[in-house]
Image (cartoon, rainbow, N blue to C red):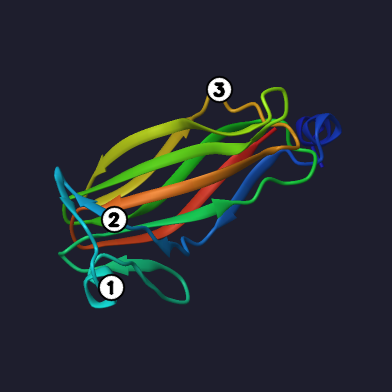
């Protein structure tokens, strides 16, 4: 083990990349591009859902939207990076939120840490997050909106 690896592990046992397949749950109502579509039936809702497979989540040309949690490793005090990889015929918009409970104000809170629109046809977007301080009352949520046929193969978060 190199000295830089030992030094990183000594500062935080949770430091490094947490890698996950994209396994979203549906979000409603849906917004496709600038058009808001209110979901009124299960059949209509299913038109905008990602199909979750063993290794990926994908959708047809109608697009989809979904959300999933990003687990915060025990001991992590900050999210410092985010990565997503896949394919799309149009664009994929990615939102990362810090959510949780504000103990000082005794209320829930939500702060957007990332809002990016990524063009296709293939992408590997790797970005830094500067305002990602976390405490034991914070969680992370990811929302993805695909405007056309898309497949998401990887999401990852880097923690310190």
Kind of element beneath mark 1: helix
Identify the residue shown where x is 23% and y is 67%: 40
Please name whichever residue, 133 or 83, is drawn nearer the observer in this view of the structure: 133
Dot placed on the residue nearer the N-terminal end, 3 or 2: 2
Q: Which residue is mark 1?
A: 46
| In this view, the mark in front (1 or 2) | 2
Residue density around tag 3, few if under 14, some if 14–19, many if 20 or more, within 10 Å: some
Instruction: Calculate the distance from the C-alpha at mark 3 to the C-alpha at mark 1.
Output: 35 Å
Horizontal arrangement in the rendering, residue 130 relative to residue 18 (left or right): left
Give percent across and percent down for residue 39: 24, 63
Dot placed on the residue nearer the N-terminal end, 1 or 2: 2
Give percent across and percent down for residue 134: 67, 31
Q: Which residue is mark 2?
A: 29
Does the image show residue 129?
yes
| In this view, the mark in front (3 or 1) | 1
Contact, mark 1 vs mark 2 (Cβ under 8 Å): no
Kind of element beneath mark 3: loop
Looking at the image, residue 124 lies above or below residue 136: below
Instruction: Calculate the distance from the C-alpha at mark 1 to the C-alpha at mark 2.
Output: 12 Å
Kind of element beneath mark 2: loop
The quarter of the picture where residue 160 lies is top right
Contact, mark 3 vs mark 1 (Cβ under 8 Å): no
Dot placed on the residue nearer the N-terminal end, 3 or 1: 1
Looking at the image, residue 54 lies above or below residue 71: below
Horizontal arrangement in the rendering, residue 57 relative to residue 158 (left or right): left
Identify the residue shown where x is 20% and y is 63%: 149
The quarter of the picture where residue 132 lies is top right
The dot on residue 131 is 3
Give percent across and percent down for residue 10: 86, 32
Identify the residue shown where x is 46% and y is 39%: 96
Give percent across and percent down for residue 125: 38, 41
């Amino acid at each position: 083990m190199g000295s830089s690896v030992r030094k990183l592990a000594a500062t935080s046992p949770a430091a490094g990349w947490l890698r996950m397949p994209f396994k979203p749950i549906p979000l409603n109502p849906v917004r496709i591009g600038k058009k808001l579509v209110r979901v009124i039936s299960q059949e209509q809702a299913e038109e905008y859902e990602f199909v979750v497979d063993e290794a990926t989540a994908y959708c047809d040309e109608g697009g989809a939207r979904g959300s999933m949690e990003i687990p915060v490793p025990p001991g992590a005090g900050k999210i410092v990076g985010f990565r997503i990889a896949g394919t799309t015929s149009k664009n994929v918009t990615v939102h990362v939120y810090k959510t949780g409970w504000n103990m000082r104000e005794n209320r829930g809170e939500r702060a957007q840490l990332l809002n990016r629109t990524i063009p296709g046809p293939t992408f590997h977007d790797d970005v830094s997050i500067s305002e990602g301080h976390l405490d034991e009352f914070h969680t992370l949520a990811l929302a993805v909106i695909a405007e056309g046929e898309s497949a998401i193969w990887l999401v990852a978060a880097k923690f310190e």
